[in-house]
Amino acid sequence: MRVLFIVLGGITALIVTGIGALLLLFDPNDYRDSLTTAVEDQLGRSFVIEDEIGWSLFPRLSLELGGIRLGSGDGFGDTPLLSAEGVSAGMAVMPLLSGQIQLETLNIDQPTVRLIRNQSGQANWQIGTAGAEAGESGGAGSTTSGLPDWLAGLSLGGIDLSDGQLFYTDQTTGERLAADPVNLDLGAIALGQTAPITFEAAIERDGEQWQTRIDGDLIVRRDHTLSLRDTAVSANDLTLTELNADVVQTAEGWRIHPLAAQFYEGEYSGDIRLGSQQSRMPIAFDEGLNGVAMGPLLEALTGIKRLTGTAGINADGDMALSSGAEPLGTLNARGDFSIRDGAIQGVNIARLIREALARLNGETPPAADANPSTDFTSLTGSVVVRDGVARSDDIAMDSPVLRLRGEGQTDLAAQTLDFSLDVSVVGSLQGQGGEPPEALRGVSIPLQIEGAWSEPSVRLNIARVLQQSQGTQIRERVEEEVDNLRDRLEGLLN
């Protein structure tokens, strides 16, 4: 963000210089070297205006730059941090008489941003300057943010950025990300004032593509903080609405807090800290969901709809976005969940029990469901995630028919399951074949769920339960007969 302000300031200075040159009947190109030198001194890296500066007086005062190029600094070769095919803006003349600088819409044509972390761990977006150091030592209300007073009073008619590209490369891990194209339409900007924003980008990482869009209001402040208000954010089918967030720059990177949104019929709140200045680019979070519809949410995240219901979820943890590994594989977190009035789709556990009993008795199993599911009134548990593997030791599911207890784990990156559960029949199986047999009352049936999220394997071991139950009944009958025989013998002896 600091780079953006400085470049905008440089362009504004160029326009102001152009006005002075115009008034003195000088060519604004005479001041091009002075401008580039000033930017280079401020940022500590090369800045080039590749073409001559074009300008016009009527019907408005305007300047047009051809290609521009901002270097990445030492350690990155000739690869620029920022380049663009053209930059142009106009300026209202009359406000200059009262000392105000009012720019019209800033047009940026085909910009390319290349974010690079080199093999030494240096990042080309880290810019250490005297202005930044002063900002670090200033207090919360300090104005030592690197923005000169005249730039703080700047108003801009907006930014129109078209056909942009963004590339991220981490040479320490081989991590790559691309956003192409990138388009930005930002309304009139004045520091501390609301500006409408529309942002679109097609993002690709490891062959996975995300179509992203942001629509809302943006507030830019002098201290480099940003606020989004009443904003909608979408990434493919994943959508947040009524988003309100404050984005604050920290020594490690950025913090998004407070953060709240409407999310899949429920509410989302969070506190996100991104270590953009650190090599692994860690992201830490403390988040909560309340009243969220799990079915459409999981379908948007994974493309699989296996679980429905209204959920409350709390989680805090961290993961690395740039470690050379799948980010989910670096996730470490703790959380808990509570889902009510839902269903596990793709399997009808009650019917599986009736089918298994029918086969054991030599009967014809009931016809399979076209759309099997296991309804529940509540599903709860706590979760611990270690290196992308989420484990729960206290899974509890209740329904009018079944009670389920158990433990297990899921690999979030590989999308696999491994759960060992116990199922108890507590109600009528009517609709799945009638009342449960006496042998199943009060006993737990082992249930194993494993395999891929999309096609899990579900196995019940009723035969073992029945054998154990029958063995118990035989022992109880023998013990009863022994007791009866003992009573008769004692009667004869007496």
Image (spheres, rainbow, N blue to C red):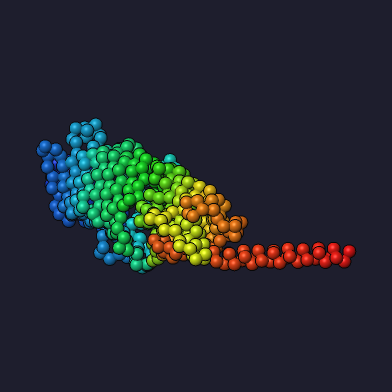
Where, quadrant-wise, is the C terminus in this rendering? bottom right
Left or right, 405 with respect to 215, comes to right
Pinpoint residue 179: horizontal percent, then vertical percent. Answer: 27, 56
- The residue positioned 76% from the left and 66% from the top of the image is 482
* Number of callouts: 0
- The residue positioned 30% from the left and 43% from the top of the image is 215
Image height of 438 relative to 249, above or below: below
Pinpoint residue 457: horizontal percent, then vertical percent. Answer: 44, 64
Pinpoint residue 130: horizontal percent, then vertical percent. Answer: 37, 52
Q: Residue furthest front?
A: 492
Q: Residue furthest right?
A: 494
Image height of 372 relative to 448, above or below: above
Where residue 275 sits, quadrant-wise, is bottom left
Left or right, 237 with respect to 55, comes to right
- The residue positioned 57% from the left and 57% from the top of the image is 437
Pinpoint residue 344: horizontal percent, then vertical percent. Answer: 45, 54
Observer able to see residue 89 = yes
Viewer-closest of 246 and 454 = 454
Observer able to see residue 5 = no
Viewer-closest of 27 and 467 = 467
Viewer-closest of 8 and 358 = 358
Left or right, 338 with respect to 186, comes to right
- The residue positioned 18% from the left and 54% from the top of the image is 85
